[in-house]
Amino acid sequence: MKIAVIVGSTRPGRNSEAVAKWVYELAQKRNDAEFELVDIADYNLPLLDEAVPPSMGQYANDHTKKWAAKIDSFDGFVFVTPEYNHGTSGALKNAIDYIYKEWNNKAAGFVGIGSVGGTRAVENLRLIMGELQVADVRAQVSISLFTDFENFSVFKPADFHVDSVNTMLDQVIAWSKAMKTLR
């Protein structure tokens, strides 16, 4: 199984990058899947600029084709999302919306970051995943800006989050294996 840990923000000074790297480092200690850190900032995706709806799979732009190929290479995903105004980041939503079939019949887990642990951003993503035919797992990780960061910028996660990450990864891997039979 190949699982992407996706950095869900492109904002300067973003906290999601440090959290995603931490999740990736924890995942690297496992031997039940291959993990890759995927930063949406590396794909320079402008606001959706494809003329044909993504569900048609007729991508015209090189940046879309590169993004589609990357996402298609995975069996499952861990989205690390900040919470902005009770939802996920616009950058992550835009990256998700660029493609369609590359997401289908895979599994996803979530790590939310925010004043209330990013729970509303995760709930927002769960709705989106349903439309993309992605099975989202129950376990999630909630990172608090108040208790897991020093001065809201230096990531210092509480120890109990390690168990939460591993539980979520257990579920993502199991569901990714099950979903592979549908592809």
Image (cartoon, rainbow, N blue to C red):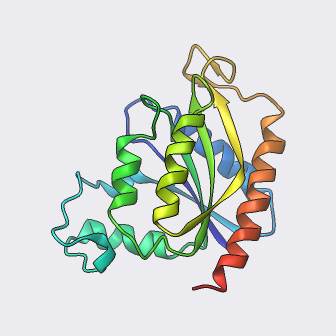
Instruction: Name the spot of residue 19 as percent of width and height, x first.
Output: 61, 38
Residue 41, can we see it? no
User: Residue drawn at (15%, 68%), measured in percent from left and top?
Assistant: 51
Q: Is residue 117 above or below residue 111?
A: above
Tell whether 133 sits left or right of 53. Answer: right
Percent position of residue 12, x then y: 37, 32
Q: Residue furthest top?
A: 151
List x then y, in percent, for residue 179.
65, 77
Q: Which sits in the foreground, 50 or 18?
A: 50
Q: In terms of image quadrants, where is residue 150?
A: top right
Q: Residue furthest left?
A: 51
In the displayed structure, would residue 17 be above or below residue 166?
Answer: above
Give the quarter of the image for residue 57.
bottom left
> Of residues 115 and 61, which is closer to you in this image?
115
* Location of residue 81 in the rendering, given as x and y in whole percent from the top left corner: 52, 42
Q: Residue sitting at 72 percent across and 52 percent down?
A: 138
Q: Quadrant of residue 176?
A: bottom right
Residue 123 in view (yes/no) = yes
70 left or right, relative to 63: right
Residue at 70% across, 41% down: 141
Q: Which quadrant of the figure contains the C terminus? A: bottom right
Rendered-image quadrant of the N terminus:
bottom right
Residue 72 is left or right of residue 55, and the answer is: right
